[in-house]
Image: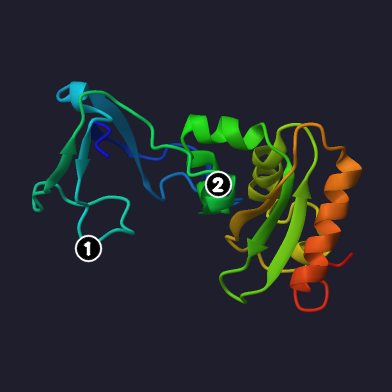
Amino acid sequence: MFVGLYRVRCLGLLAVDTPEPHTDEIMKAGACDLYEVVRDERLSDLGGKVVIAWGLGTRSWAQRADRQDKVVLELRSEFKEPEFPGHLAFLRALSEIDLLPESWKVALAATKGVYLLTCPRTREIYVGSATGSGGFLSRWQEYVRTGHGGNVRLRARDPSDYQVCILQVAGSDVMDEEILRMESLWKLKLQSREMGLNAN
């Protein structure tokens, strides 16, 4: 999806020690360059309307546009978020949760129930439940923020970008105690205590 054009200007060497975004590291003064990114309003009317083929470098966050022409796959008349796939079809990595379309976040925040985390490195599973305000979204954002969501076995492991999906959605009138019973049943079905990451 085309978002827009941006100009990048080098401001010179970093003047003061600065925390590195998303890590505990400190970037030392004079050890790296500082850049300013400014939106270029040219083609801004096409933002969110043009879909291009990114090519083989699908994991690259940036490519040299001056060296690689892109094929336009779709030109939309208006910006439209992709439709929410439904709770039981939802499947994402935790690192993608905060990048979801706003309408998806609203749907996930309004719903409680039982979910499954899968570790991409060890293939182990963890069954959990979302019972508090903010539903699934709030619970998963806690994992993103802490790396473990307060869970004993997850806290004892190296952080991982778990894949998350929904096993069961609770009705709006279902009490938290019933959701916890649903969670326990899924733990039994999937044997996540014996062969997974659940400690209780």
89 or 6: nearer the viewer = 89
C-alpha separation, residue under disc 1 versus residue under disc 2? 27 Å
Q: Image quadrant of residue 76?
A: top left
Figure coloring: rainbow
- The spot of residue 111 in percent (x, y) is 68, 36
Camera-side mark, 1 or 2: 1
Do the residues under discs 1 and 2 have CB atoms within 8 angstroms? no
Q: Residue at horizontal 11%, vertical 48%?
A: 71
Horizontal and vertical percent for residue 185? 83, 62
Relative to 78, is 122 on the left or the right? right
| Most foreground residue, 188 or 108 | 188
Left or right, residue 69 beside residue 108:
left
Q: Earlier in the sequence, mark 1 or mark 2?
A: 2
Q: Amino acid at mark 1?
A: Leu
Q: Is 167 rendered above or below residue 76?
A: below
- For badge 2, the amino acid type reads His
- Element on which disc 2 rests: loop
Q: Which mark is residue 56?
A: 1
Residue 169 in the image: x percent, y percent?
70, 45
Up-down: is 173 above or below 176?
Answer: above
Residue 139 drawn above or below residue 102: below
Q: Which residue position holds label 2?
A: 22
Q: How busy is the neighbourhood of tag 1: few (under 14 within 10 Å), some, or many (20 plus)?
A: few
Where is residue 176, by image quadrant? top right
Residue at the image point whose x is 76% and y is 78% from the top: 195
Question: Of the numbered discs in the image, which one, if any, rests on residue 197?
Answer: none
